[in-house]
Image (cartoon, grey):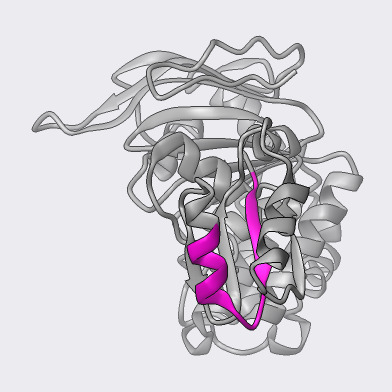
């Protein structure tokens, strides 16, 4: 069952064994700016949970509250069953996090940054420190650049270094804020693969992103934020299934196809080259009748059908807004 709601207020979530759970979590900054408004969130154990929304929708503010970096104005948050920020000393050693991008010491090498980071962890065994650092660097593809000064790292390399820091110890929860920021397409694919591997090992991954494509490819569950409010949440497949797909027609006669479909009452028609797309017709309209009408009018069809709804379709249907879907 999908835990979902509307912009007017999502249904509260009760997720047994939830790794992250919030109730009415709210952050209002000085001057009255409402960054997060009454957030009720439930992240199931073992999930790869996508926290989705445009830049400025309240994702990073929410993560900062979850990690105890800022205090909420009202509401509560629990991580691994413990209240935050009150239980931070118990919770945070079990959580790896990359928030608002890494900030390494530029005068130190990538390896020395991680050695310093690991030495600040009172739970880390110093006898195995160098081995852990080497494994983390290798896992994020930085082994060859480990000796280079961090000031010479590209944004993507710094992002990988931040991920390596989060992976120095086994974690029950990994919180990643825009983890593919600054990465090229190959780097993005590698991070998605890494996230899947971590989830397969039993780590719950909470991944914030403004990229719909990224969430749809790697996440099992997702929540959609807009203007500081939770719009909906649930399994990714169910969120997409809740939206109607699009009618897609490929033809060398796109103008004629658009005209005929419009005359048959089809709405939301868009033409892009030899492709015509439109709102999927209601259930009482047979697709076979539409295709027959096109053929009867002399429109040559290369393909015809209704495409499965995507997470982008669901987002637009829920919010009425466009979205950055670059991958």
- Figure quadrant of residue 32: top left
The span shown in magenta is 245-260
- Figure quadrant of residue 78: top right
- In the displayed orientation, state which residue is furthest to the front: 296
Q: Is residue 276 left or right of residue 27?
A: right
Asked whether the viewer can see residue 182, the reply is no
Residue at horizontal 46 percent and vertical 22 percent from the top: 6
Residue at horizontal 40 percent and vertical 24 percent from the top: 7
Residue at horizontal 50 percent and vertical 75 percent from the top: 255
Foreground of the two, 152 or 292: 292
- In the displayed orientation, state which residue is furthest to the left: 31
Instruction: Give the x, y percent position of residue 227.
Output: 32, 37
Instruction: Give above or below for 296 relative to 99.
Output: below
Residue at horizontal 37 percent and vertical 39 percent from the top: 58
Instruction: Give the x, y percent position of residue 51.
Output: 56, 41
Instruction: Give the x, y percent position of residue 97.
Output: 60, 48
Q: Is residue 259 left or right of residue 179?
A: left
Instruction: Give above or below for 297 relative to 59.
Output: below
Q: Is residue 205 left or right of residue 132?
A: left
Foreground of the two, 135 or 51: 51
Image quadrant holding the N terminus, namely top right
Foreground of the two, 37 or 323: 323
Image quadrant holding the C terminus, namely bottom right
- The verdict on residue 291 being magenta is no
Asked whether the viewer can see residue 34, the reply is yes
Foreground of the two, 60 or 255: 255
Instruction: Give above or below for 118 relative to 280.
Output: below
- The verdict on residue 254 being magenta is yes
Instruction: Give the x, y percent position of residue 281.
Output: 61, 42
Q: How many marks?
A: 0
């Amino acid at each position: 069952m999908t835990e979902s709601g509307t912009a007017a207020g999502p249904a509260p979530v009760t997720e047994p064994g939830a790794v992250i759970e919030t109730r009415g979590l709210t952050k209002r900054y000085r001057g009255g700016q409402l960054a997060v408004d009454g957030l009720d969130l439930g992240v199931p154990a073992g999930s790869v949970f996508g926290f989705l929304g445009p830049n400025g929708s309240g994702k990073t503010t929410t993560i900062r509250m979850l990690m105890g970096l800022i205090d909420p104005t009202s509401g509560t948050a629990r991580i691994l069953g413990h209240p935050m920020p009150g239980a931070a000393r118990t919770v945070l050693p079990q959580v790896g996090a990359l928030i608002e991008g890494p900030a390494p010491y530029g005068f130190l090498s990538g390896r020395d940054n991680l050695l310093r980071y690991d030495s600040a962890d009172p739970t880390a065994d110093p006898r195995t420190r160098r081995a852990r650092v080497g494994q983390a660097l290798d896992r994020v593809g930085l082994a060859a650049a480990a000796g280079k000064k961090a000031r010479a790292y590209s944004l993507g390399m710094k992002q990988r270094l931040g991920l390596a820091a989060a992976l120095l110890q086994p974690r029950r929860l990994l919180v990643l804020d825009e983890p593919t920021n600054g990465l090229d397409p190959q780097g993005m694919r590698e991070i998605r693969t890494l996230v899947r591997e971590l989830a397969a090992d039993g780590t719950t991954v909470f991944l914030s992103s403004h990229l719909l494509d990224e969430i749809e490819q790697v996440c099992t569950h997702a929540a959609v934020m807009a203007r500081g409010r939770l719009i909906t949440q649930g399994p990714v497949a169910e969120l997409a299934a809740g939206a109607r797909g699009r009618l897609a027609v490929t033809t060398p006669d796109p103008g004629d196809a658009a005209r005929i479909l419009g005359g048959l009452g089809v709405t939301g028609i868009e033409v892009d080259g030899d492709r015509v797309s439109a709102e999927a017709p209601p259930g009482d309209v047979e697709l076979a009748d539409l295709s027959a009408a096109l053929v009867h009018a002399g429109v040559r069809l290369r393909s015809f059908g209704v495409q499965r709804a995507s997470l982008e379709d669901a987002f637009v249907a829920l919010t009425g807004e466009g979205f950055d879907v670059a991958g």
